[in-house]
Image (spheres, helix red, strand yellow):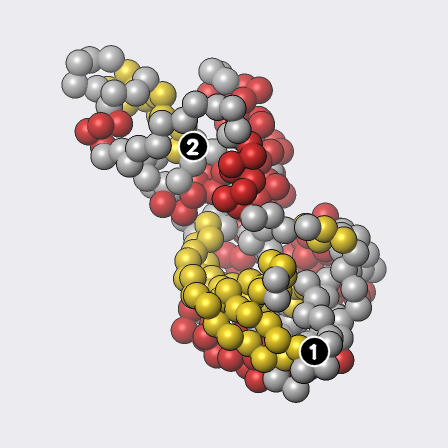
């Protein structure tokens, strides 16, 4: 579903307004995959490493698992926690979709994605794994005047924010027992096509898949195209590394401020430079 992001309701008085992007869209992933594969013959199979030898080409689209590729040259992952909840309004208000950044200490944000039928995904992601539960509990408490929440399920995970540059290699040739070569190539989150500052990766990973399809079977061209397209992710990763280092306690450098501003512009947030710097939030806590 998609639509204009409305103004935040009064029940979120302690939270900043939702990011004023021009529109927000959410996808029900199982239905999307079903639509994309309609009319295609698929053989669903859980592959062991030995069974995988039967295939000449393996596309590693296993996300954070990176099941078939060698390790990244320099990996970086961040934890996430998401609840699926039933939302009941006390006074006919609607829990609106939104993304909230500067209430999460460190690097991270809270999101609300309605699913229909009074259900929603509400989650948080950031550097500090041991505080994610408390962030959600605080949100429920702050919103309890207008809404009741019944938790249906909980999902914990990680997102790779290493950037493609630091997720090399994208591909390699593996010698099989019969002496022939098997090509293994990664796409999407397995090779880091996730925005390091925001954790957004669906559109970027779909674009990565298109680059792969357009480049196949030239893996060198594929690598160069992905690195060129997502150069900005490398710069954001370098800023993350700085913030996570002891030197980062000295505050953002000029290039870090500029990258944060560019990220806001790229995400459709119309922030002037000074507002972007004022709204860094407690990044360095």
Residue located 27% across and 33% down the image = 47
Q: Can see residue 108?
A: no
> Residue at the left extreme?
177
Labels 1 and 2 touching (C-beta < 8 A): no
Viewer-nearest residue: 116 or 208: 116
Percent x, y of residue 238? 54, 51
Rendered position, 225 above or below 77: above
| Crowdedness near tag 2: few (<14), some (14–19) or many (≥20) residues, C-alpha within 10 Å | many
Q: Can see residue 180?
A: yes
Distance from Cα at disc 1 to Cα at disc 2: 41 Å
Rendered position, 62 above or below 104: above
Closest to the camera, between mark 1 and mark 2, is 1
> Residue at the bottom extreme?
145
Residue located 43% across and 52% down the image = 76
Q: State the SS at label 2.
A: strand
Q: Is residue 144 left or right of residue 23?
A: left
Residue located 61% across and 66% down the image = 118
Q: State the SS at label 1.
A: helix
In the picture, the disc for residue 186 is 2
């Amino acid at each position: 579903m998609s639509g204009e992001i409305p103004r935040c309701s009064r029940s979120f008085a302690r939270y900043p307004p939702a990011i004023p992007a021009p529109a927000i869209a959410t996808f029900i992933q199982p239905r999307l995959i079903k639509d994309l594969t309609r009319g295609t013959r698929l053989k669903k199979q859980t592959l062991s490493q030995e069974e995988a030898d039967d295939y000449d080409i393996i596309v590693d689209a296993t996300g954070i698992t990176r099941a078939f590729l060698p390790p990244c040259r320099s990996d970086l992952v961040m934890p996430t926690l998401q609840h699926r909840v039933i939302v009941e309004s006390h006074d006919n208000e609607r829990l609106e979709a939104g993304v909230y950044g500067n209430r999460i200490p460190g690097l991270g944000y809270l999101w609300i994605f309605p699913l229909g039928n009074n259900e929603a995904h509400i989650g948080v992601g950031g550097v500090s794994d041991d505080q994610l539960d408390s962030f959600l509990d605080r949100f429920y408490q702050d919103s309890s005047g207008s809404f009741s929440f019944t938790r249906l399920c909980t999902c914990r995970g990680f997102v790779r924010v290493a950037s493609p540059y630091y997720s090399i290699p994208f591909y390699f040739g593996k010698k099989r027992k019969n002496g022939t070569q098997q090509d293994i190539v990664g796409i999407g989150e397995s090779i880091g096509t996730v925005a390091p500052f925001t954790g957004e990766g669906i559109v970027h990973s779909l674009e990565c898949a298109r680059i792969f399809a357009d480049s196949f079977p030239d893996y060198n061209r594929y690598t160069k195209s992905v690195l060129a397209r997502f150069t900005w992710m490398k710069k954001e990763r370098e800023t993350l590394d700085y913030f996570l280092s002891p030197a980062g306690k000295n505050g953002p450098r000029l290039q870090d401020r500029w990258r944060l501003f560019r990220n806001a512009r790229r995400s459709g947030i119309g922030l002037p430079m000074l507002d972007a710097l004022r709204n860094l939030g407690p990044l360095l806590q």
